Image: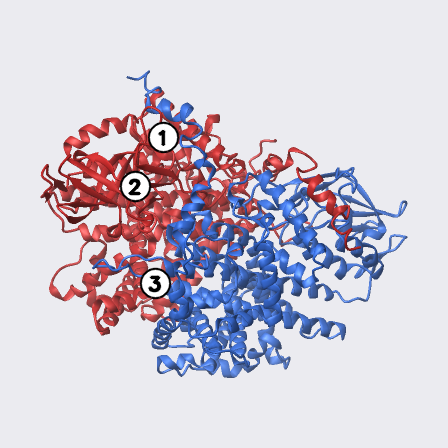
Chain colours: A red, B blue
């Protein structure tokens, strides 16, 4: 294949320093360097090949994933990679597997909920992968409602053991990743019962399989829950089901940092604050927001590059057709997603800071920002994952028919991403939690309690209620303060409206429940404000590099104004802006698209993804799309033979009228 | 498994005659009877089993589809099914295959574009499946822009033949279903070149494979284009690629109804009006709208039933948790989709009438409604397929985590449905065509030319510009005339605004292009009005059956008011309604959800889908979801053995520290 950069002309038009933007995207020169080295390590190792996933049957696919996980572990040890490098390597291997849950849930849960002694016993085993653990919380009949879990852990003082049991079919553990075929141990969440009393849900370490031959231990039924969405996607993962028939474990295997059961069977709540558990949640959700920007940026990278390569219509005289990226309809769908990828990247970065801040406060017994931090991360998890799932599918549609081919990489990306909308808190349930917090904040405004952090704006209640947007020309919409105030006023007024409507109901709970659809919209408005405000703060930082700040400013304005356009009903209904001002925002948005247009390809180059990692023929760096599409097509097993398997049994008899004899 | 109807209580609450609604949904008693008999035929025949699709590798999957197609053809002949029955049988087999294109595109195109002589020669062969045909239009580099196709058909007067040739890589035919491995013939669209002149794109019948042994004919390169989105989905179809190296066909194989090439090579346009071709398009798009209501109703049926079975939260005292369907957040997402399924069903029915009307007028040389009918069907195709694709995915999310399992049926339904947004006209491109027609209609308003059909409302220009909504209480939003006028005023004012903004641009084309994102929104508003108005007309018909009209009225109001809520920005920005009126509409919507709630399960029962056709454990009629989920899980190949394939190579060495030796 000839080596030509079909996108060279696009790249030459960029008005900023792409290398400087790579640093901004990665977070630091060091982070960029780590990502770059790990990406090359993965891209050049044939074991990590992934283009064959769509054609593998489940068993082969799964075995291949086991192979990659083992190989990654081998390389991590051989090369003595740091924790940061190893973690980036796993991300870039880009295939869900048991190690995700082992490192992402099992280990952190023991760290967070285990006593010092328990950590000393289990963590070294887990760090060396001498045991492989999963996180068995969700049950067949109980997902969002953790307090409704049915699995029981009954203390038996005679033997100093817990009896783990699944009393019903719906109490089967269902979904935990790594459980189905691999994990030797599970962190099982079960209702603690001692002295005849139910003390709610706690965590227990339970061994599932023999460390000698991997056979299932007595009393345990375990298996895989079956095929999932997509060709490859999460079918590389052994999400599992698990049932216990009176399985006994030593008392010491209950995680006892927050509460304990004594030798006699007394249940004791320790003085370690329960809010500590929130800390872990903030951390997990922060990484989910980072994953969102990563997934969305991959999809956008593919769609932007292919939109610059693809031509359609617009040629009257035999000259080349128009590049699809030059259509305003394409820009109005694609560029807000490009802006969102950057927006989520920066808000994810800020969440890291928030996590550090929360941890520090916890250590100082300061719980004042805990509830706000919790609401904020729950909301951002919901907002970014929903927008990313929709955004990936939109990018797929923006690639036209070819986006439907697995070789585009987009079907796989969508199918592997969408569970993020459901796991670690269903997105709607999370928004209702945010709304509940907002309603509480609004109701306390008169009481002198000052709202903190991302709700601080609500402290300016009177100002926001009286606010009138003073935009007179389209350029006024470029001012950060104008954008920020409009978003603040909208979010605040929606919250106040909801609060007033709830207060009209016979009871607060009935009101909350009746208005919950409106409350979800209010929570979304609040979360969008957070993302917009953090993007504005980012742009106001001192960032070096030719043209970098200008590009970030354009991205930030596109993010904010495209949201304003999409939700203009909110802004109009609450009287924050006039129809004329909404229309001016739309005019400004079109002008911003034109400013972004020459930089679009360079802005996705700044993500610094290798072709191997992107895994998309349409998104390849050199834009040489069509020969690659064909090359991929010929690899399909159906092309192994000219005459397909089944011809003699099922095609020839049709053509030869074998089925019509009786009639004719 | 015990035989209990877990949804019996739900069914007992229904306030209407479900059997009467089945007739309304099917269109007639006769149609219901046909669908019912064919569904039972498919459900009871083990060859048509489809639950194994997600675990089959591509080759097995494809072979299995060939088997089903042959078996269906055998049964159609054995049972001497009518055309209507055979067509319904194929729908219910529910698996994309070459027969779809043969019957849906190849045969109709010969009928529509072939001369009487050509029809006499080719149709009998096609009707008996002595030849299998596909429709080879789309090329690797040319989808939406048919006029940009590159394949050439050059007339050679020496031999009285056309030379079919693919001059470039991008001219490869790409995507045609049935082409990759099965079709013996293709209807190839190519640029006709004769006497050195290019006469644009025409259709040619080209044989691809030997009727004796299925080998590829000389000069032809043909194959499958590779894996597509989803586990099963369109991977049962051999979408193909095709290249010609100077392939010769007789002159008689150009379809010559509309234009001809003479023996001497003269190009002649016949007096058969080109608008005839529009007729076929109206027909194809009408069936796409029908498919949309079918696909959406399946997803909604699954989500409604499972939402009634599933319980989550809300239990403080050990009583059962709350049914998920009782949550307002669930209702506000699910019930508008249920209403949309009905809305699309009725607008699809009306499109059948429109097609009959258009055909009749064509035969009488009356082209006055042609452009309007074309715009209307293009717009409805776009509106209903986009809403259905999004709606299926929303239903999947509404089923929580379990919606991600293939056994829910929803991933497959989504993956197999989404191409409808792209094929037969990309949805955004189609909306721009609608917008162009609307702009023309608006610009001619002063000229005395009266707008017809679905644009007739634009004739009341002055009234719609002066209109002010007079809603004072939530109940006012129940009046059909109130809803209709609000939607008319919104659509008209958006169109007028666009027209005015375009006229400010230096040129009409620049203006159209610059404002195309707004034009798309305007076209959507117009199309939504069509669906709303046809639903209102339907409800005003005389429909027998206990409670039927009441239910249809509720569905219609939910459809309209949920759209109004979603697009309230349009209604406010154009001054059609006030914020207060928008808020009243929202109040009314909540009340309508409560009215729909007791009827929801019965409303999806009225679709009359068998469990086999639905193919969803979550949507099964008796609601006995959990045992079935587990039963499906154990069928996964990964559960064939306790210790997974790959344990000895890739898990044991990790646990036994084989990869750490070098380090420790």
Labelled disc at residue B329:
3
For disc 1, the marked residue is A33
Confirm or deny contact between disc 1 and disc 2 (CB under 8 A). no
Q: Secondary structure at mark 1?
A: helix
Q: Residues within 10 Å of mark 3 (few under 14, many from 20)?
A: many
On the question of residue A174 being in view, the answer is yes
Chain letter of the residue carrying label 2: A
Q: Which residue is mark 2?
A: A136
Q: Secondary structure at mark 2?
A: strand
Which one is in front in this view, the residue at disc 1 or the one at disc 2? 2
- Judge whether B455 appears above or below B97 on screen: below
Which residue occupies 40% across, 73% down?
A: B572
Q: Nearer the viewer, mark 3 or mark 2?
A: 2
Which quadrant, please, contains the C terminus of chain B?
Answer: top left
Visible residue check, residue A480:
no
Sequence-wise, which precedes: disc 1 or disc 2?
1
Quadrant of the image occupied by residue A263: top left
Q: Which residue is rendered at x = 52% and y = 47% of the image?
A: B51
| Residue at the image position 43 percent from the left and 65 percent from the top | B601
Instruction: Give the SS element for disc 3.
Output: helix
Q: Is label 3 on the same chain as label 1?
A: no
The foreground one among B596 and B18 is B18
Residue A482 pos. (x, y %): 31, 61
The crowd level at tag 1 (other Cα within 10 Å; few <14, some 14-19, many 20+) is few
- Check the image and report above or below for B163 versus B599: above
Can you tell which quarter of the image residue B13 is in? bottom left
| Distance CA(mark 3)–CA(mark 1) | 45 Å
- Depth order, front residue of B223/A38: B223
Q: Which mark, by number, is residue B33?
A: none
Find the distance from the CA under tag 1 to the CA under tag 2.
36 Å
Task: Give percent across and percent down for residue A151.
Answer: 26, 46
Q: Chain of mark 1?
A: A
């Amino acid at each position: 294949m000839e080596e030509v950069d079909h996108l060279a002309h696009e790249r030459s038009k960029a008005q900023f320093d792409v290398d400087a933007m790579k640093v901004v995207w990665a977070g630091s020169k060091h982070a960029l360097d780590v990502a770059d080295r790990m990406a090359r390590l993965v891209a050049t190792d044939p074991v990590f090949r992934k283009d064959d996933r769509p054609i593998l049957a489940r068993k082969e696919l799964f075995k291949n994933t086991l192979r990659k996980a083992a190989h990654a572990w081998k390389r991590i040890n051989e090369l003595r990679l740091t924790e940061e490098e190893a973690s980036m390597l796993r991300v870039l291997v880009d295939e869900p597997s048991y190690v995700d849950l082992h490192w992402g849930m099992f280990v952190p849960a023991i760290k967070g909920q285990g006593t010092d002694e328990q950590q000393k016993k289990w963590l070294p085993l887990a760090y060396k992968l001498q045991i492989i653990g999963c996180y068995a919380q969700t049950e067949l009949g109980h997902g969002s409602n953790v307090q409704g879990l049915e699995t029981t852990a009954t203390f038996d003082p005679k033997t100093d053991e817990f009896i783990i049991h699944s009393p019903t079919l719906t109490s089967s553990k269902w979904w935990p990743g790594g459980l189905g075929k691999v994990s030797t141990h599970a962190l099982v969440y079960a209702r603690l019962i001692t002295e005849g009393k139910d003390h709610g849900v706690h965590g227990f370490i339970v061994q599932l399989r023999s460390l000698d031959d991997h056979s299932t231990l007595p009393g345990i039924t375990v298996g895989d829950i079956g095929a999932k969405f997509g060709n490859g996607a999460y079918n590389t993962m052994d999400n599992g089901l698990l049932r216990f028939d009176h399985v006994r474990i030593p008392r010491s295997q209950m995680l006892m940092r927050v509460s304990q059961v004594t030798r006699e069977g007394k249940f004791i709540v320790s003085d370690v604050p329960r809010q500590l558990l929130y800390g872990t949640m903030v951390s997990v959700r922060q990484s989910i927001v980072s994953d969102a920007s990563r997934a969305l940026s991959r999809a956008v990278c593919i769609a932007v590059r292919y939109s610059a390569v693809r031509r359609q219509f617009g040629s009257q005289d035999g000259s080349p057709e128009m590049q699809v990226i030059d259509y305003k309809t394409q820009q109005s769908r694609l560029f807000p997603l490009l802006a969102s990828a950057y927006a989520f990247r920066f808000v994810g970065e800020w969440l890291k800071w928030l996590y550090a801040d929360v941890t520090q406060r916890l250590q100082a017994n300061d719980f004042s920002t805990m509830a706000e931090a919790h609401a904020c991360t729950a909301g951002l998890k919901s907002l970014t994952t929903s927008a990313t799932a929709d955004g990936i599918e939109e990018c797929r549609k923006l690639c036209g028919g070819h986006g439907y081919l697995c070789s585009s990489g987009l079907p796989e990306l969508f199918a592997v991403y969408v569970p993020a909308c459901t796991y670690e808190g269903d997105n709607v349930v999370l928004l209702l939690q945010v709304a509940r917090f907002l309603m509480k904040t609004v109701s306390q405004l008169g009481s002198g309690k000052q709202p903190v952090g991302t709700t601080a704006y609500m402290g300016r209640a009177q100002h926001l209620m009286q606010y009138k947007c003073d935009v007179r020309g389209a350029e006024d919409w470029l001012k950060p303060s104008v954008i920020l105030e409009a978003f603040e006023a909208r979010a605040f007024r929606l919250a106040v409206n909801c609060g007033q409507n709830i207060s009209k109901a016979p009871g607060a709970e009935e009101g909350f429940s009746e208005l919950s659809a409106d409350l979800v919209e209010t929570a979304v408005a609040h979360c969008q404000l957070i993302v917009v405000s953090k993007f504005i703060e980012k742009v106001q930082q001192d960032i070096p590099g030719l043209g970098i700040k200008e590009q970030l400013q354009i991205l930030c304005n596109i993010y904010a104004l495209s949201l304003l356009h999409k939700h203009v009903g909110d802004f109009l209904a609450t009287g924050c802006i006039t129809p004329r001002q909404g229309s001016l925002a739309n005019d400004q948005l079109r002008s911003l698209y034109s400013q972004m247009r020459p930089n679009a390809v360079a802005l996705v180059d700044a993500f610094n993804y290798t072709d191997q990692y992107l895994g998309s023929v349409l998104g390849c760096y050199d834009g040489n799309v069509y020969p690659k599409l064909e090359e991929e097509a010929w690899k399909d097993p159906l092309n192994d033979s000219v005459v397909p398997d089944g011809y003699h049994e099922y095609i020839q008899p049709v053509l030869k009228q074998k089925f019509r004899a009786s009639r004719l």
